Image (cartoon, rainbow, N blue to C red):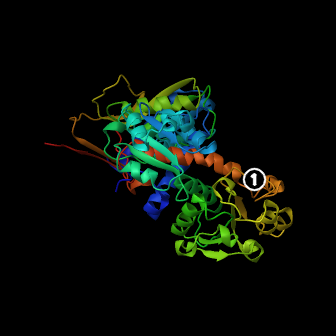
């Protein structure tokens, strides 16, 4: 089989996910070397096309490409002709005419990466499309959990917060299910999409009912920029009912793992105390993100498939 | 080569390495994935008899290959593991077979990303000729005259469940 693009976790089989994560382990080792750069993608050019603001994702992809010796071009929409009314396809065709090997795209509209993948002759990686999917974030989250637990089979994972606007939650629910975890979500009814349970998760409205029984707490960022008015009464009330507060911390399972895709609204979805806890793996997620993205770029750019034996040249 | 031949050859190679490197405390072995690794471990065991253990690492050259674009499918990365300092050491790179020399070229490039050894020596079980780069091993188990498209299959107990070297002539 051949993985041509990475558009969403939904398109990946369990074996493909595990192959990417297994390869990411090798790249994690590369990042710890005295010289953390390998020549694997020398001569390749990758374009980061970010139509939405991003700090850590674009930095992570840029670093991943650099660590593989690929050239990386960052296309910031605020300084581009898209601001002058150029269409998405025009923008991309013009960039591809400059001969690039891959496009990493983020857009506020769901489906943009799929649209591009059908029209360009290079690989496409979805770095977040609207409220749809954010596959590399889910992969790095699951990589971080696997690093801690070894296997996710039967582990109870609770995703808390703004599920409705979260592509991270969607990709994670699909990924966790494929890796055998039991997923639950918890949010105010206004922040839960209709039919979320059909993705394969239990639904809770009261955090205190489930929080203390789970192995993983995945706190989501409250995406105020995507919200209409009136979805929550106030940030203070949200914290009271759905925040990982100091009081709640003391009642968690001792071996629990806390993750967050960042950036954290400290004092809203989490109290600052959480940062200091050994169970909090937010910075591990960031480091693992580079390794996971290296694996994805390598698998897509260096060949045309995932599962093959090495053919040494002697 | 039979299992007995391989055992005797590994033993002789170990003696040659010991004779060339009197300062065994400063020696390290690094096997090239996959079959170079068990060979390096076997040689380390021989060298370690009655003296200090010689550290063994492994190196996977997949990310340093110069022919990735020619390979139809993406090779899987097995990973390198060198958990000791190679700066100032004499490193013996170990591989099962040398052919074009490109694997060793890649291994040397990768090795130098881990540090600056004082010197690097190359040990191979089989030299089958047909070099495309000016790379020659310091220690050779056996020279085998081959045609370019002949196959040299090396089986080692740790990977394949048996010790054997088989030459298959084509045409």
Q: Is residue A226 left or right of residue A14?
A: right
Q: Position of residue A233 (x, y in %)?
A: 77, 65
Q: Is residue B155 left or right of residue B144?
A: right
Q: Position of residue A212 (x, y in %)?
A: 76, 73
Question: What count of labels does the image hold?
Answer: 1
Residue found 53% across the figure and 75% down from its top: A198
Q: Is residue B53 left or right of residue A81?
A: right
Please tell me whether residue A287 is drawn above or below residue B132 in the rendered image: below
Please tell me whether residue B111 is drawn above or below residue A247 in the rendered image: above
Residue found 48% across the figure and 44% down from its top: A104
Outermost left residue: B171
Q: Quadrant of the C terminus of chain A?
A: top left
Q: Nearer the viewer, residue A207 or B68?
A: A207
Outermost right residue: A247
Q: Could you tell me if residue B49 is visible in this image?
A: no
Q: Could you tell me if residue A32 is visible in this image?
A: yes
Please tell me whether residue A54 is drawn above or below residue B85 in the rendered image: below
Q: Position of residue B96 (x, y in %)?
A: 39, 40
Location of residue A123 (image quadrant):
top left
Q: Quadrant of the N terminus of chain A?
A: bottom left
Q: Nearer the viewer, residue B138 or A71?
A: A71
Q: Position of residue A253 (x, y in %)?
A: 77, 69
Under circle 1, the secondary element is loop
> The residue marked by circle 1 belongs to what chain?
A
Name the residue tied to disc 1.
A265
Q: Nearer the viewer, residue B51 or A303?
A: A303
Location of residue A139 (image quadrant):
bottom right
Location of residue A147 (image quadrant):
bottom right
The crowd level at tag 1 (other Cα within 10 Å; few <14, some 14-19, many 20+) is: some
Q: Nearer the viewer, residue A235 or A267?
A: A235
């Amino acid at each position: 089989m051949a993985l041509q693009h990475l558009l969403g976790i939904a398109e990946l089989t369990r074996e493909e996910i595990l192959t990417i994560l297994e390869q990411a382990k090798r790249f994690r080792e590369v990042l710890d070397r005295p010289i953390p750069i390998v020549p694997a993608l020398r001569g390749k050019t990758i374009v980061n096309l970010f139509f939405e603001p991003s700090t850590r994702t674009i930095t992570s992809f840029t670093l991943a490409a650099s660590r593989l010796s690929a050239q990386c071009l960052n296309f910031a929409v605020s300084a581009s002709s898209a601001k002058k009314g150029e269409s998405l396809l025009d923008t991309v065709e013009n960039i591809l005419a400059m001969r690039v090997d891959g496009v990493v795209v983020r857009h506020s509209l769901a489906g943009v990466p799929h649209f591009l993948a059908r029209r360009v002759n290079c690989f496409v990686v979805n770095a977040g499309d609207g409220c749809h999917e954010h596959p590399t974030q889910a992969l790095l989250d699951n990589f971080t959990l696997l690093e801690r637990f070894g296997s996710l089979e039967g582990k109870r994972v609770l995703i808390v917060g703004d599920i409705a606007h979260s592509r991270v939650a969607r990709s994670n629910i699909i990924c966790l299910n494929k890796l055998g975890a039991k997923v639950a979500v918890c949010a105010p009814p206004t922040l839960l999409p209709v039919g979320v349970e059909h993705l394969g998760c239990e639904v809770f409205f009261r955090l205190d009912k489930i929080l203390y029984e789970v192995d993983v707490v995945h706190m989501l960022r409250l995406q105020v920029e995507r919200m209409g008015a009136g979805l929550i009464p106030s940030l203070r009330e949200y914290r009271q009912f759905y925040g990982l507060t100091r009081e709640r911390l003391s009642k968690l399972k001792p071996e629990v793992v806390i993750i967050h895709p960042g950036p954290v609204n400290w004092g809203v979805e989490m109290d600052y105390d959480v940062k200091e806890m050994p169970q909090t793996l937010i910075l591990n997620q960031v480091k693992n993100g580079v390794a996971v993205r290296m694996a994805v770029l390598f698998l897509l750019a260096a060949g045309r498939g995932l599962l093959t034996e090495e053919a040494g040249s002697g | 080569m039979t299992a007995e031949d391989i055992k005797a050859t590994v033993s002789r190679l170990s003696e040659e390495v010991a004779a060339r490197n009197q300062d065994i405390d400063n020696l390290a072995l690094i096997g090239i994935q996959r079959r170079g690794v068990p060979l390096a471990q076997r040689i380390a065991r021989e060298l370690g008899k009655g003296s200090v253990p010689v550290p063994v690492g492994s190196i996977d050259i997949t990310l340093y290959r110069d022919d990735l674009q020619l390979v139809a499918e993406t090779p899987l990365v097995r990973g390198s593991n060198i958990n000791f300092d190679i700066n100032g050491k004499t490193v013996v790179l170990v591989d099962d077979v040398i052919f074009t020399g490109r694997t060793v070229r890649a291994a040397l490039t990768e090795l130098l990303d881990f540090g600056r050894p004082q010197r690097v020596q190359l040990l191979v079980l089989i030299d089958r000729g047909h070099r495309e780069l000016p790379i020659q091993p310091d220690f050779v188990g056996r020279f085998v005259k081959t045609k370019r498209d002949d196959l040299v299959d090396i089986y080692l107990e740790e990977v394949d469940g048996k010790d054997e070297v088989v030459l298959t002539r084509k045409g």
